[in-house]
Amino acid sequence: MPAQALFADVQPVTGPLYEVRDQQVHMRPGQHQVEVDIIIPEGYEVFFPAGTELTFGQGVAFISRSPVFMYGEEGRPIRLLSPGGDAQGFTVLQAGKESVMRYVEVEGFNTLARDGWNLTGAVTFYESDVRIDHCTFTQNQCEDGLNLIRSQFELTASTLSHTFSDAFDADFCTGKISHCRFFRTGNDAMDVSGSEVEVSDCTVEHAGDKGVSVGEESRVKAWNLDIRFAVIGLAAKDRSRLEAAKIRLQDCGTGFAAYQKKPEFGPARIEVSEWWGERITRLHLVERGSVVILNSTPVETI
């Protein structure tokens, strides 16, 4: 397995980039150029101080099987940069303890691709719980700006923008998204599959496909969302259920869509109360068998 090979016989040692002591890896403050992979095996804790700036070279990756604690501050964020758009992601795998990202800026990353092992996220947490607040993910050049897999999470007061495809993708996760802004995404702003998620007090602008996409038996509750300039505002598919309230839609192609995409699943359901819409080309698209209820009134299927 490529992942196993990456971690084989790896042991962090103190150097110009970080100091190792008592099973803790402490990134050194200041600006650093990263030209070789940072690989952290299990059994450590990784700390990033406020104001740290790491600029990653072509093909370079951060991969950790230990939790990360990134405590930036307002005015002194932690910055992870890939000016060439070709660094291979920031990845945390099976860390065993909740990670924290606070006041972190991630810009210009691609995703991990090693010997047939390919991920989809510029930032990926796989089977690794995480709390993210006051972070920025922008100009990332891969399928997902932020990809969480089989993890519990909180995403708060953060901005995800200018992503090649999806800004946020949660697969088989449980979590909350609140007070976030998503804009200029090539595909979906928020895409959840097989997950249970609450979304509140968020803004979506200029989504290349859906503002919120709910699939593969997901359960999502959403309230107080502003969605502008999306192809589809809210979509549920493949036996998913979306309950929403206080939804504002402007300049969208379709407001609400419910359908089945994959044969192994079934129809979907959307129920919305208190919604407002302006300049919506088609208010709803409902495939036969699926259900959309707007202000207690079922709408017709196609």
Image: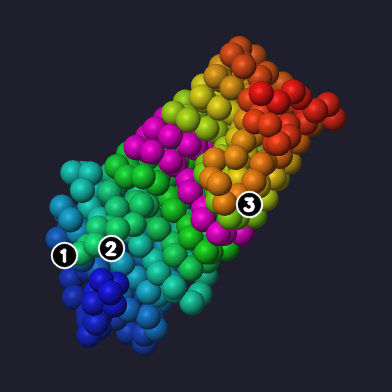
Q: Quick one: 108 or 1, which is closer to the camera?
A: 1
Q: Quick one: 289 or 196, which is closer to the camera?
A: 289
| Residue ID at (25%, 71%) | 2
Q: Which of the two discs, 1 and 3, sits closer to the camera? A: 3
| Residue ID at (64%, 34%) | 258
Which label is found at residue 36?
A: 1
Dividing the picture into quadrants, the one containing residue 261 is: top right
Q: Position of residue 116 (x, y in %)?
A: 24, 62
Q: Position of residue 24 (x, y in %)?
A: 37, 80
Residue on which the image places disc 2: 117
Q: Earlier in the sequence, mark 3 or mark 2?
A: 2
Check contact, mark 3 vs mark 2: CB within 8 A: no
The CA span between labels 2 and 1 is 18 Å
Residue on which the image places disc 3: 217
Which span is picked out in magenta? 162-189
Callout 3 amino acid: Glu
The quadrant of the rendering that contains the N terminus is bottom left
